[in-house]
């Protein structure tokens, strides 16, 4: 059995109980410091109790060579925290002597609002050679109320997932007013925070700022589609602005598709406190005795060598441990949304099938507009909620389309937006009690629709039934695009009202209801690929990605915009989970658009019969090429080489795990007359310095010759020190290079 070594607690009179795989430590009453290091390959968080048994974060940084020294890391600290309480608390309570921003605020069963949390014991569960779970139990000395702080670590990937579990045995319910997932403390000085401002078709716009004394919050109050305006993704850089290849950084996300809040506070010592969790805004939660409330997770990757390494760790973790079928395959596709919008019938779709077959993609994806009869879905004002095929558009039904697609050698996928309803629908007419709306106020719509009350188990059954019925009738359906286009206005749950539960539970119960539906879907249909879409990228979320294979980053498919968006999403997500479609947005040629969409999971949303013969021939060969290198993009390591935010060009590459193959994407991102970025070569990364590589340009447009064709063989050492010039010019705005190791 692998356990923590006893030298972590040499002077601590603790009781140690050994169970298989589990080390369980209990503090004695005469408290000596208990030191709890939580360690990955390149990082350590060290928590330690003081003489009153309060638990502090005493270290956050590189691991020590001698773990025995963790217990003395706090010896040189001289904090005097009488001014506003405990800045460095591992989980900051409120209502007692602590006056800092709390992680937790409660009202006890007797109405008292004070909370003190003292270390009781901790357990370490060794899950396997790479991962472990440390659970630390803190308890109020006065009330039967406790919080378990949970830290799951993956050593090799340097990823930590942190959450809290709250329970009590008071005589009555306790109201949780704030219940953070994580409360971190950093003493590094000079903190730079990158956050992401968003909006429809302009998702993930980064902004980096040095944190100044005081509190900076990033939050969402949108209910669903929570990341529409701000994202719960962030990058923290310690000591200097975030850099790709050097410096200590943390890349994080609060994995929660509902209202979230991230607080970054520089305290009076100029240290940084971070408190992240469900947004306490209108979300007080009444917890009955002896039930466990589990918060969402804060997930973060750490590196001492910049954002590139942190991203690769996060990508490896996501593919191996988090995303559904993260290490599997994906389906290339043709989607009909921009090709037809709501205006289609069977024949038009069958015409598109032919185009999909000619392109060489795996699947046809039928988008919005296929359903509704009393209120046909011929636009976005009606029909949402009525999930029966529209008999005028699709008289032979979905089953017929599935088999027609199969004749063309294509799989068939379908669009759903199952959490929503148009007021002009039979669902609304029959089930007003299933709709989130204030009963006595005028309805307010977002994209002409309202959100269903997923707190209600009957609504959960309905939503599960939509998917289940589709698969029961059409077992060969191969894919679902799960859309979510509205935020929650007039938050009010008829179900919570009926049950006499507080309306402030809606934020949490909605999301729990959604998870419940997804768990049921996955229990019955474990592997069917599903795309998470939210009117663009409002839901790129690591909790939902347990159930989804991929997500749609933005409706903005202008390839220039996409270069930036895909770049910014790439800090957080591996390319295999980002769906990129070639559309008619933007003014770039087809080659440019296909090359950009190839930096993730490739799809198309065009009418191929509108393409010129040369464009069509190019598209076919580019799809064939994609099938030969997609494995590197999906499963390899990603290196961001030239940042489009800082240069005339963008360059990004993927390297196979065995370092035998690499694919490098280079684009011109402006049209200045002189392109200074390619005066010198672009330096490659991630290759084997001892291997030798050929470099060739692929995805050449018919009739063009490569400006970089050569037969020379380069060492990995050369390519990673001197580099290779893709010769991006105004005439060559998009260049894809492939490097292959020679034996
Ligand atoms: C929003 C999505 O982002 C689009 O791709 C499309 O599916 C529309 N909804 C359909 O209404």
Image (cartoon, grey):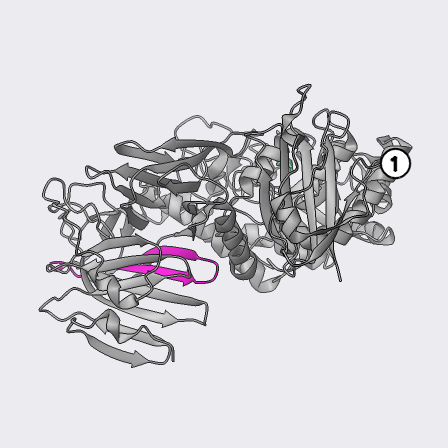
Name the side, left or right, on which 718 lies relative to 89. right
Residue at x 34% of width, y 75% of height: 3
Neighbour class for label 1 at 10 Å: few (<14), some, many (≥20)?
Answer: few
Q: What's the magenta bit mostly, secondary-structure-wise?
A: strand
Residue 334: name its quadrant.
top right
Q: Is residue 197 above or below residue 544?
A: above
Local secondary structure at mark 1: loop
Answer with left or right where residue 9 lies relative to residue 707.
Answer: left
Q: Position of residue 500 (x, y in %)?
A: 32, 48
Residue under circle 1? 702
Q: Quadrant of residue 68?
A: bottom left
Q: 311 or 458, which lies in front?
A: 311
Q: Position of residue 692 (x, y in %)?
A: 71, 56
Query: Which residue is depicted at the point 40% across and 27% down?
Result: 441
Q: Is residue 68 left or right of residue 464?
A: left
Give x and y (percent) for residue 309.
50, 50
């Amino acid at each position: 059995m692998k356990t923590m070594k006893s030298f972590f607690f040499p002077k601590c009179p603790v009781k140690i109980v050994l169970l298989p795989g589990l080390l369980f430590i209990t503090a004695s009453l005469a408290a000596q410091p208990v030191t709890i290091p939580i360690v990955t390959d390149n990082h350590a968080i060290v928590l330690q109790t003081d003489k009153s048994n309060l638990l502090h974060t005493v270290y956050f940084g590189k691991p020590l060579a001698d773990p025995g020294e963790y217990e003395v890391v706090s010896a040189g600290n001289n904090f005097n925290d009488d001014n506003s309480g405990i800045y460095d608390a591992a989980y900051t309570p409120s209502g007692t002597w602590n006056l800092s921003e709390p992680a937790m605020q409660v009202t006890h069963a007797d109405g008292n609002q004070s909370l003190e949390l003292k270390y009781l014991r901790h357990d370490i569960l060794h899950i396997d050679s790479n991962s472990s779970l440390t659970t630390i139990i803190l308890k109020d000395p006065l009330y039967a109320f406790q919080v378990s702080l949970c830290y799951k670590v993956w050593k090799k990937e340097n990823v930590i997932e942190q959450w809290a579990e709250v329970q009590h045995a008071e005589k009555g319910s306790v109201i949780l007013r704030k219940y953070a997932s994580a409360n971190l403390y950093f003493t590094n000085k000079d903190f730079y925070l990158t956050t992401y401002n968003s909006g429809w078709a302009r998702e993930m716009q980064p902004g980096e700022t040095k944190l100044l004394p005081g509190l900076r919050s990033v939050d969402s109050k949108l209910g669903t589609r929570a990341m529409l305006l701000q994202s719960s993704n962030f990058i923290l850089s310690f000591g200097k602005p975030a850099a790709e290849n050097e410096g200590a950084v943390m890349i994080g996300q609060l994995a929660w598709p509902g209202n979230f809040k991230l607080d970054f506070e520089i305290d009076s010592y100029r240290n940084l406190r971070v408190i992240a969790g469900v947004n306490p805004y209108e979300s007080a939660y009444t917890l009955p005795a002896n039930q466990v409330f589990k918060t969402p997770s804060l997930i973060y990757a750490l590196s001492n060598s910049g954002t590139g390494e942190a991203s690769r760790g996060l990508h490896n973790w996501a593919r191996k441990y988090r995303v559904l079928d993260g290490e599997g395959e994906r389906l290339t596709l043709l989607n009909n949304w921009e090709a037809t919008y709501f205006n289609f019938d069977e024949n038009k779709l069958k015409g598109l099938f032919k185009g999909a077959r000619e392109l060489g993609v795996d699947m046809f994806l039928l988008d919005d507009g296929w359903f509704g009869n009393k209120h046909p879905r011929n636009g976005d004002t009606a029909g949402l909620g009525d999930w029966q095929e529209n008999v005028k558009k699709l008289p032979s039904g979905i089953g017929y389309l599935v088999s027609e697609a199969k004749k063309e050698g294509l799989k068939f996928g379908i669009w759903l937006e199952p959490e929503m309803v148009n007021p002009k629908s039979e669902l609304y007419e029959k089930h007003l009690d299933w709709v989130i709306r204030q009963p006595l106020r005028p309805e307010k719509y977002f994209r002409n629709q309202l959100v269903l009350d997923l707190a209600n188990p009957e609504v959960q059954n309905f939503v599960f039934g939509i998917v289940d019925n589709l698969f029961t009738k059409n077992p060969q359906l191969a894919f679902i695009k799960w859309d979510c286009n509205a935020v929650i206005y007039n938050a009010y749950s008829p179900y919570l009202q009926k049950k006499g539960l507080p309306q402030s539970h809606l934020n949490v119960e909605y999301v729990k209801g959604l998870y419940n539906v997804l768990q049921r879907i996955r229990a019955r249909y474990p592997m069917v690929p599903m795309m998470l879409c939210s009117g663009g990228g409002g839901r790129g979320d690591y909790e939902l990605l347990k159930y989804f294979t991929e997500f749609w980053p933005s409706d903005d498919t202008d390839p220039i915009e996409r270069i930036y968006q895909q770049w910014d999403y790439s800090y957080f997500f591996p390319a295999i989970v980002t769906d990129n479609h070639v559309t008619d947005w933007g003014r770039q040629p087809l080659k440019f658009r296909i090359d950009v969409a190839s930096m993730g999971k490739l799809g198309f949303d065009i009418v191929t019969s509108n393409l010129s013969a040369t464009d069509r021939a190019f598209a076919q060969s580019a799809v064939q090429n994609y099938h030969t290198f997609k494995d590197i993009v999906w499963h390899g390591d990603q290196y961001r080489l030239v940042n489009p935010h800082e240069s005339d060009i963008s360059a990004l590459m993927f390297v196979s795990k065995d370092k035998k193959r690499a694919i490098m994407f280079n684009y011109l991102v402006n049209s200045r007359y002189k392109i200074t970025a390619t005066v010198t070569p672009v330096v490659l990364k991630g290759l084997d310095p001892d291997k030798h590589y050929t470099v060739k340009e692929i995805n050449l447009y018919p009739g063009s010759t490569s400006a970089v064709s050569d037969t020379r063989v380069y060492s990995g050492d050369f390519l990673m020190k001197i580099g290779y010039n893709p010769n991006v010019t105004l005439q060559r705005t998009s260049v894809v290079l492939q490097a292959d190791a020679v034996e």
